[in-house]
Image (tube, helix red, strand yellow):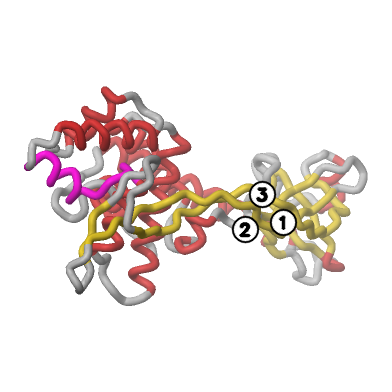
Amino acid sequence: MRLHLKTILGLSLTVLIMGCETGYNPSPEEIAAAEARKQADIEYREKVAKIATSLNQDPNSNNAWVVQKNYSNQSGYAIFKGPGAKFYAIDVKRFEEGKPIQQLIESNIAVDGLVYTRKTEFENDWRYEDRSGSFCPSSSSCSTKTDSFGNTYYTWSERVDFVKAVEKIYYVDPKNGIEFTEGTTVSKDLEAVAGALEEENLATVRDSLVSQFGLSETRASELASMASSMKNIADSQGRALTERDLESLQVKAMGATLSDLKKAKANGDTKAIESMTAKAAQMNKISPEQAKRLLKQLGL
């Protein structure tokens, strides 16, 4: 299922920060930019497919040419499997229709003899884990809960860093050692939305978070991915986002829930508001002034 751009923006900017209380409408420019990226991707993929069709016109090909990977880490090159189950990288932009593969190789438009290779590599990753206890750590922003017996306790989210093993697939040119990466395991935040969100939509969400709230591109990408992932998980389970889902997203975005922020404002608790503002600034790597403007824009 593909989420509409407006839905994704709403999740990242509205559900992530505010829950379901206000709406967000992307500007015509944002929509146009997303559509342009989408159209460019469609046209590129169509051209890659036509390359396979063109190569299969060779009577000696036995209709063996297939697209193996539309994109690779070598910009502009797609990966193909040809006769004899051999792998090739072809410069999509420079491809000349009607030319046999050998002429393309001689013209440095195609690279032949790629060796399919699997490697296990180790990457740093992170995740948020929910915590609860009878006291709130000084380094965390906590929510107060009450159990069925009337006992009060604290809950918070804690970032946990770890190292994970990732299997990567490469097509290696043995002549010069150049590696054409087929792809990697997607990051933890994007696992649940692989196939549901297009890259250009996430990029548009990221850009909106940067322009609307002054976040860095890295932080904006994290938040957009978290919101999209949470919504997709809920959809896959056939349910709506719960209050716990929303609170978890809000804590990861700002270090506190919207309820906590509103409660502090209603009680005139300036110390709590200042603490939450400082936490939001710290988590999002923005200045306290930017954090104050962000909260003011949210009506807090």
Say what secondary structure mark 1 lies in.
strand
- Between discs 1 and 2, the one toward the N terminus: 1
Mark in front: 3 vs 1: 3
Disc 3 residue type (three-letter): Glu
**Measured from the top left, where is residue 211 in percent x and y?**
32, 31
Image mark count: 3
Residue 143 is left or right of residue 186, and the answer is left
Magenta stretch, main secondary structure, is helix
Q: Residue furthest bottom?
A: 238
**Measured from the top left, where is residue 29 in percent x and y?**
29, 35
Say what secondary structure mark 2 lies in.
loop
Q: Assess whether mark 2 and mark 1 are in contact (beta carbons under 8 angstroms).
A: yes
Which residue position holds label 3? 123
Q: Is residue 27 above or below residue 101?
A: above
- Between discs 3 and 1, the one toward the N terminus: 3
Q: Assess whether mark 2 and mark 3 are in contact (beta carbons under 8 angstroms).
A: no
Mark 1: few, some, or many residues within 10 Å (few <14, many ≥20)? some
Q: Assess whether mark 1 and mark 3 are in contact (beta carbons under 8 angstroms).
A: no
**Measured from the top left, where is residue 144 in percent x and y?**
23, 55
Say what secondary structure mark 3 lies in.
strand
**Measured from the top left, where is residue 28 in percent x and y?**
25, 38
Which residue position holds label 2? 185
- Residue at (69, 45) in percent of width and height: 77
Magenta stretch in the rendered image: 253-266
- Nearer the observer, 291 or 27: 291
